[in-house]
Amino acid sequence: MKHLSIEPSILYFGTPVALITTIDQFGHANIGPISSAWALGWTMTLGLEVASKTYQNIISTKECVVNLADHSLHQKVESLAQLTGAQHIPAYKKDRYTYEPDKFKAGGFTKMDSVQVKPPRIAECLLQMEAVLKEVMVISDDPKEKGDTAVVLVRVVKIHADESIVADDHHIDPAKWNPLIYNFRHYMELGKELGKTFKAEI
Ligand SMILES: Cc1cc2nc3c(=O)[nH]c(=O)nc-3n(C[C@H](O)[C@H](O)[C@H](O)COP(=O)(O)O)c2cc1C
């Protein structure tokens, strides 16, 4: 083995794509695609650009839905990739992003009412987690980020899973759930199962 010292512009090492739905103070819904999302119990950590509409909406209305995209949605996700719901687009994004107030329509996604929060769910996503804001930490000194980013902690309050991926009453069947993975800016799906941990319940 020979490890090289490299300096990639991003460190997106292969995490699932989440479509974060939020509403603004007037009730207008937005979808923000992200890949920086992970869970500790029912607490979800989201990494968001401060200039994104998603961040602004979460700060203002304190709720969101974390909709997990499966592999089949990669083209729909990419159709949102250069859109922002934020009217003010910062200079570092201006040449690549366009303002789009209705990303449900732009991406061909369908709204579903949530149960415990106001932002809608995305019907096309088989796994949806309603969540409320807990804490925010703004990061202003990252050497590679052009704008401020934030670590946003949300508490999941309600989980919806399509019956096609549910193994019994309370488990997701890993053989049936095939998340869309964002792997160094390429969309991928999972390969074959290699085994399971001793904690696996099914
Ligand atoms: C697959 C994918 C993954 C992304 N991951 C992130 C992310 O983890 N955090 C983030 O802030 N932006 C991420 N982006 C960029 C956001 O989608 C972008 O900031 C966009 O402006 C968000 O939409 P909004 O401004 O309407 O909220 C990602 C985009 C794509 C297509």
Image (cartoon, rainbow, N blue to C red):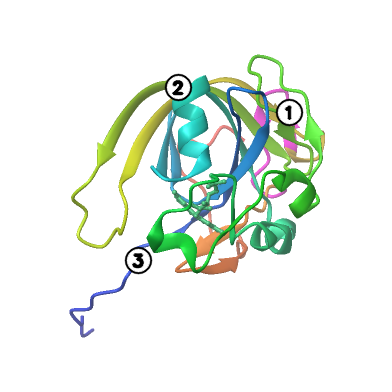
Mark 2 sits near ligand 1, with its Cβ under 8 Å away: no
* Residue 124 % position (x, y): 78, 44
Residue 140 screen position, x and y as percent: 22, 46
Specify start and end residues of the magenta stretch as a single range.
166-176
**Residue 133's mark?**
2
On the image, which quarter does residue 76 sit in?
bottom right
User: Residue 118 placed where, x, y %?
Assistant: 66, 19
Closest to the camera, between mark 1 and mark 2, is: 2
Label 1 – label 3 distance at C-alpha? 38 Å
Q: Secondary structure at mark 1?
A: strand
Image spot of residue 160 (x, y percent): 70, 27
Query: Where, by quadrant of the figure, is residue 71 drawn?
Result: bottom right
Q: Is residue 63 magenta?
A: no
Q: Residue at x 72, y 23 (%)?
A: 169
Kindly identify the residue that appears in the image at 38 percent across and 33 percent down: 152
Above or below, 142 against 66 in this view is: below
Q: Pointer 3: what residue?
A: 10
Kindly indicate whether the residue at mark 3 contacts the one at mark 2 (C-beta within 8 angstroms): no
Horizontal side of residue 89 vs 104, given as left or right: left
